[in-house]
Image: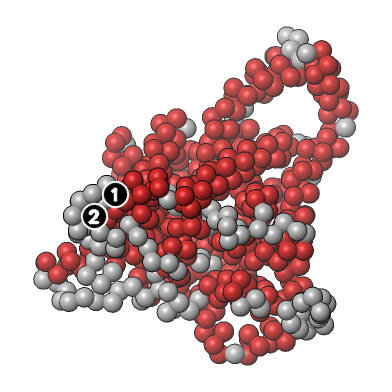
Amino acid sequence: MPDASGAARRAENFVRSHPTLAALLLLLPLFLLMIAFFVAPLLQLLNLSMLAQQPTAQNPAPPHTVATYARILGDSFYLQVTGNSILVGFCTTVTTLLVAYPVAYYITRISGWERTLISVACLLPLFVNVIVGILGWYILLLPNGVIQQVLAALGLVDGPLQWLRTLPALVAVLTYEHIPFAVLILVSSLQAIPLDKINAARLLGASVPRIVFTLILPLTMPGLVASAILVFSLSASSYLAPMLISAQRIRVLPPMIFSYGTELLNWPLAAALAFVLLVVVVAITYAFSALMNRLSNRGRWEMV
Amino acid sequence: MPGLRIFVYLIVVLMLLPVLITFPVALTAVSRISFPPVGLSPRWFLAILGDSALLNAIVRSFWLAIVSALVAIAIALPCAFVVQRGRFPGRNLIETWITSPRMIPQIVLALALLAYFESVRLAESFLGLVIAHLVIIIPFAFRTLLVSVATMDRRLEWSSDVLGATPTQTFIRVMVPQLKTGLIAAFIFAFILSFNNVTLALFLSGFGQRTLPVEMFQRMNVAGMTPVIPAISFVLAMIGVVLFVILDRTVGVYRFLAGRD
């Protein structure tokens, strides 16, 4: 391969003599892809959200206006829907962290087959389609479904109960979906705690709750914040569970965006709702991480 | 910590139950979803093979995921080298920029691409789906490859160079073997993300060319669902478990997924 290796040698010389230019060339394909299919579509969507009406063949360029945003912000229905999205995201984040933290802690304390079993169980939703998990929950939660049969046999509940279509059911399914993300982050965060710190605390006579609350929790705070942000932004913008589990009974933004965008073909309204969702998610996660940064800076002395 | 242990195993049961329940439900002999199953029969598993719409969707999803994952790695690997090894200002900025699609709710991106593809004539095309998947999976492939590039031993490359190997030989014989596990991990990761994606495909795949998750969603949401859906769900779940175990035994799941931070 004299030609190929000659070309490679020339490429090598080029990289040596123009490192910055070579770096830019290597980044170029991704750069073009991002400009053409990430930045441009989002800018077009922003433009679309400010059109007075859906562009049509007769009227391809309707005038610009902020009336759609004004309508959303002035209408208690849309505000309620936005509030529901935030509420669902918030509840899911809290339950996910409450479940994932003890599980992640337990995973770091075990090894062998037990660790594999628990890891498979808690990370499986990443490897298996979300639809499969949602279908399973749907079957489990049906009136007179598996869970209700078990509870009825134990004499705890009576008769078919309507659990689907409720907020707790939606939060439970979203928690199931997002536990893997939190477990992954928290396991790596808990594993980074040096064992000698815990041993030192133990030797000095600290009780288990004291070790947990003054040592382990503060040291894993960055992991907790990171998982809270990820889980909130994913669950507040998830579409499938609200469609299949709560079937629009709890109205949230994503199904509404979908239905205006593809069924009712009101693109300006769909686009404006999409930007409301984007801004709400970004603003809340940003504010939360800024707040946690300030709080943990204040507590830094305890962690040294 | 007996209390903690009981809690963890309760969660394990709750995490596995929805996936496992699809098996007995799919074994029913009648054509409605029920538990416990009415009679026992493998007919709904066999029905997958006779369902041409479902089979077409499986094939389409499979090719989509293969193509997207390969192209994503081809684009992301050079970027991982530049960000990891480059010595120029703004490297962090480039990293943030490459991973930024992760910050956008997928439904927003899906709507944006739906409108955009109409205007650039990619609407309802296979190429459009590949491009959309690339935008969301490249950040993850990039992060996994970045970890892999960071752990390479550069002295080996220098030795190979000093000993007279051409750059091509150095790349194939010295660098690729070191990157092998990272490349496999990135490929499987990208493949899974693409194969399992529902939101983008729901907006972007045309009526006659649904991907597997979209086909399943449509049947659950719109048309009456027969137990063929729990049957295919169980098959997918088993494939997921196998992929998981392979990854855990070769790369280690936590190390491999750590790249997603």
The residue type indicated by label 2 comes to Ala
The residue type indicated by label 1 comes to Arg
The correct choice, above or below, for A270 with respect to B118 in the image is: below
Asked whether, in this view, residue A195 is left or right of residue A51, the answer is left
Chain letter behind tag 1? B
The correct choice, above or below, for A98 with respect to B65 in the image is: below
Quadrant in which residue B166 is drawn: top right
Disc on the earlier residue, 2 or 1: 2
Mark carried by residue B43? 1
> Which residue is located at x 58 percent, y 33 percent?
B183
Q: CA distance from mark 2 to mark 1?
A: 7 Å
Q: Give residue B83's position: percent from left, percent from top.
A: 71, 40
Q: Give residue A265's position: percent from left, percent from top.
A: 65, 76
Q: Which of the colour schemes (rainbow, by chain, secondary structure, one colour) is used?
A: secondary structure
Task: Give the crowd class for mark 1: few <14, some 14-19, many >=20 residues within 10 Å.
Answer: some
Check contact, mark 2 vs mark 1: CB within 8 A: yes
> Which residue is located at x 68 percent, y 83 percent?
A69
Can residue A284 be seen at all in this image of the molecule? no
Front position in the image: A99 or A219: A99
Q: Give residue A218's position: percent from left, percent from top.
A: 45, 56
Front position in the image: B117 or A288: B117
Quadrant in which residue B191 is drawn: top right
Q: Give residue A208's position: percent from left, percent from top.
A: 29, 53
- Secondary-structure class at tag 2: loop
Front position in the image: A174 or A92: A174
Asked whether, in this view, residue B69 is left or right of residue B42, the answer is right
- Secondary-structure class at tag 1: helix
Q: Which residue is mark 2?
A: B29
Chain letter behind tag 2? B
